[in-house]
Amino acid sequence: MTSRDNPTEPATVYPGDRGATMDDDTDADYLAYVYGRLKALRRVAWLLSGDEHQADDLVQETITKLYARWPRISAVENIDAYVHTMMVRAFLDEKRRGWWKVRLFGAPPERPATVAGQAEDRTLVRAALAKVPPRQQAVLVLRFLCDLPVAEVAVILGCSEGTVKSQTSHGITALRKILGDSSMPGGAR
Amino acid sequence: MNDDEYAALMLRPLAGEPAGPPGIDVPKAMRDGRRLRSRRWWTGSLGTLLVTGLITGGVLLAPGRHETPLPDLPPDPAVPAACTAGRLPAAGHRSAEVKAGDSTGRWLIGTSDALSKKPGVLVWHDGKVVADRPVQADVWDINASGVGVGSRRINGKDYPYVIRDGRLIRLPGGIGDAAAINDAGVIVGTIGQNDQARPARWRTPDSPPELLPAALGIPGTATMIDIAPDGTAAVAASSLRPGIPTTGENGRPNPDAWRHFTALWTPDGKVRALEAPGDTDFHAVGFAYGWLYGGGFPPVPGQGPLLRYHPDTGTWQQVAPAHRKAQVTGPSRWGKFIADVPAIYVGTGVLELPKEMDAVRRGSGDFLVETASDNAHVVAGTGVGVNSDPTKPFQPIIWTCHD
């Protein structure tokens, strides 16, 4: 005599959280969101900061604050924009605190160097970008590395589209001054 | 070249993906976030920023991107619709028992006349006995190549062994025990004995054992439970909870003083402790269907919920709120029990198996289910007379199931 047992969908936690209870739908939603976005969030943080350790710190801070606010904001229409706002704000805060002075020289490089020319270009451009005012850095990264439209960058930064455009213009001008027109990366002229 | 084109070209070397492993701790974010909630920091400036952003850019909001991709979890096999029970051959032995089987259900391993003066080891392939060795040994697992593992007692001490082509071959490392083997041939077990036993892993039967690195405060007496197909080993351990006396008011050991947990030892040598949701103790009993199953301590029916953990995604599921009287199959010695109605977990469902009536007639009508194939089509175990007549011989049983 064989019998089937057809239970309802098992309670699930993505991924493990010691403090969560498995029938807490709110936590499950948060975990599902964070798990699904973690890779993308880390990429944005890395593009903003240029450093994997700082990127992890930015994501950690962002998802911590996100959890704290989750019961109130999980129904927000554009959670991604909200989360990006939190991350950019954390990035700007870190710039003010001088994170790089604490961590940049404390950790050895973990990645093998890529092609020498590419690595040099990356170092050169990253150093130049670091000299641009932080808010302009964020605009340039979000627009040209994250490929976000002006309107979405405006939402993330909490400003008008016109401000985004002017910040973009100022940032590019600053980059031109630092790098010079003749020093296009990769030998482009 | 306009400004936008210039900027895109200029910043191009910075594009890409972070290459190193992420150092993000989601459970910590939840713990810290929970503390922030309690301080009601949610009224802070970021909320204001959001409101400002939504107001100023309200009409420009991109369409909602609410898709929340979930981890890829392995599909559970269907609970079979029907099974038939049959008795396995015992090569003329009065008593024989199945101890383990492989992922395909084609290989089974067990012992014969275990309680007699002439015990032996039996290996079945496709339901036929292919090895019958008169040695005193315990056997705990067998893989899809027909290689079994266990321990052999010599001069009062146990040594880890593999059983291959009917031959017993001692593993390097001295006194110990081989608890499980995966289809890649990686073996896990212990080296040493009693308080000196350490979880160990052999990459091949010829290679020296690697010992579980000292980490996480795992005591040396931690128990090796099982090995996953990818080589990840599950280790069950206990540690003292701080501030709780180890002796109760009655002078007996206080079980609440111990926290029981499971650690995963991955093939790259790293060890991490699993933290079950809700501060639940999690004592693993074995890998099955791509998950690590376990429960509280002891992990037996009636002792709290049965949980399972998916190592690749860190996902927890509650299989049953109260651990039912059904068996989690696998090589682990933990969590096994004898039942009058044989049953196993298949995924998160329960498959009740028919009694093998010949065993019932012979007085061995209680069942210890040990193994199930990955598709749950082959299940095996032993009919015993523990509850009815312990003098009755063990009967090796195989259940063949279909959807």
Image (spheres, rainbow, N blue to C red):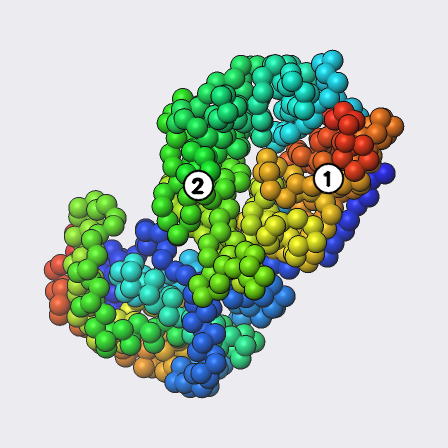
Q: Which mark is residue B195?
A: 2
Query: Which element carries disc 1, helix, strand or loop?
Result: loop
Q: Amino acid at mark 2?
A: Asp
- Report whether mark 1 lies on the same chain as mark 2: yes
> What x and y, as percent, mark residue B97?
69, 26
Q: Give the answer, above or below, for where A11 lies relative to A158.
A: above
Q: Is residue B300 left or right of residue B8?
A: right
Q: Chain of mark 2?
A: B
Picture quarter with the C terminus of chain A = bottom left
**Mark 1 to mark 2: distance in Å?**
29 Å
Residue beneath the point at 58% across and 70% down: A26
Q: Position of residue B191 (x, y in %)?
A: 43, 33
Under tag 2, what secondary structure?
helix
Q: Which residue is mark 1?
A: B338
Residue A55 circle label? none
Which mark sits nearer the N-terminus, 1 or 2? 2
